[in-house]
Image (spheres, helix red, strand yellow):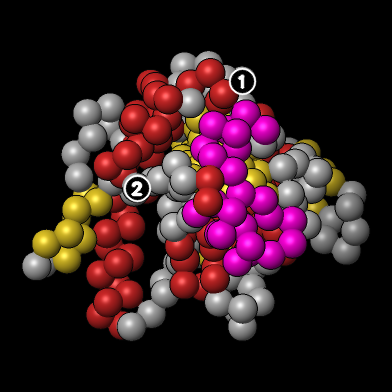
Amino acid sequence: MAWRRDGPGDGPVTAGGADRTRRGRRARSAAAEDDEERRVSTDLPDVSGLSIGILGGTGDQGKGLARRFALAGHTVLIGSRSEERAREAAEAVGARARGADNATVAAEADIVIVAVPWDGHKATLESLRAELAGKIVVDCVNPLGFDKQGAYALPVEEGSAAQQAAAVLPDSRVVAAFHHVSAVLLLDPEVDEVELDVLVLGDDREATDTVQALAGRIAGVRGVYGGRLRNAHQVEALTANLISVNRRYKAHAGLRLTDV
């Protein structure tokens, strides 16, 4: 039998007590490692100086994201097949926004967000393969169909829109994000903070960290790593569920993750 001398409770330590002590130490060590992992995972890069290009930036989603990033101090390049429409959208967004054709935006922006309609997704990216080479490309496209029963997810040969983008753009660093952000809230001048989490998926850790940090530039928003790009399908498909929620409750629902 061993003895301990650690204060008012001095007394014998049995073999079982020693085992419990060791287990307690291991538990505390594991907890410390978890705390360290959590701290490291939130150590994101400074993205404040990056310019952001948005392909399909004349739609509500693209224009809403452009507005919020411009408010955060970023230079925003709004792209469209029509340069005239792109310039009109940039004027509506205001300071720090500039409109141009998609090819110009893809070539000049530091990071490019894809917000084009699903039916033009593949063709648009194929036409911009050279301009997007070497860049982080953020795909927020949701392949959805609509009928009398509401929204539903469409099958995608590659698995998801983001995986299709990765297949079409082998020289780009494709990340999936911004699927569940309400365009109505993004565009509403009376909404100061958009309270939600953005799931960020990808196979390149540096790229996903950058996009997480970029999401955090929108007031109220937090970027959360959501897995590899192969998991993008269910994230894109979940948008159909949120549309159903919004229609039933006349809301602009988003996601918040707990214990992260």
* Residue 203 in view: no
Position of residue 148 relative to residue 157, above or below, is below
Residue in view at x 11 percent, y 62 percent: 147
- Estimate the x, y position of residue 123 in percent, counting from the top left: 34, 30
Residue 192 in the figure: left or right of residue 228 = right
- Estimate the x, y position of residue 223 in percent, counting from the top left: 60, 51
The kind of residue on which mark 2 rests is Pro
Foreground pick, 172 / 82: 82
- Residue 27 lies in what quarter of the image? top right
Residue in view at x 40 percent, y 33 percent: 124
Where disc 1 sits, the SS reads loop
The kind of residue on which mark 1 rests is Gly
Q: Which residue is mark 2?
A: 117
Residue 146 in the figure: left or right of residue 47 = left
Position of residue 119 relative to residue 124, above or below, is below
Would residue 107 be counted in the magenta stretch?
A: yes
- Outermost residue to the left: 148
Q: Main secondary structure of the magenta part?
A: helix
Residue in view at x 44 percent, y 57 percent: 59
Q: Earlier in the sequence, mark 1 or mark 2?
A: 2
Residue in view at x 61 percent, y 57 percent: 90
Foreground pick, 139 / 126: 126
Would residue 53 be counted in the magenta stretch?
A: no
Position of residue 203 relative to residue 152, above or below, is above
- Estimate the x, y position of residue 54 in percent, counting from the top left: 55, 45
- The quadrant in which the N terminus is found is top right
Where disc 2 sits, the SS reads loop
Q: Are marks 1 and 2 in contact (CB under 8 Å)?
A: no
- The part of the chain drawn in magenta is 85-108
**Label of residue 134 in the image:** 1
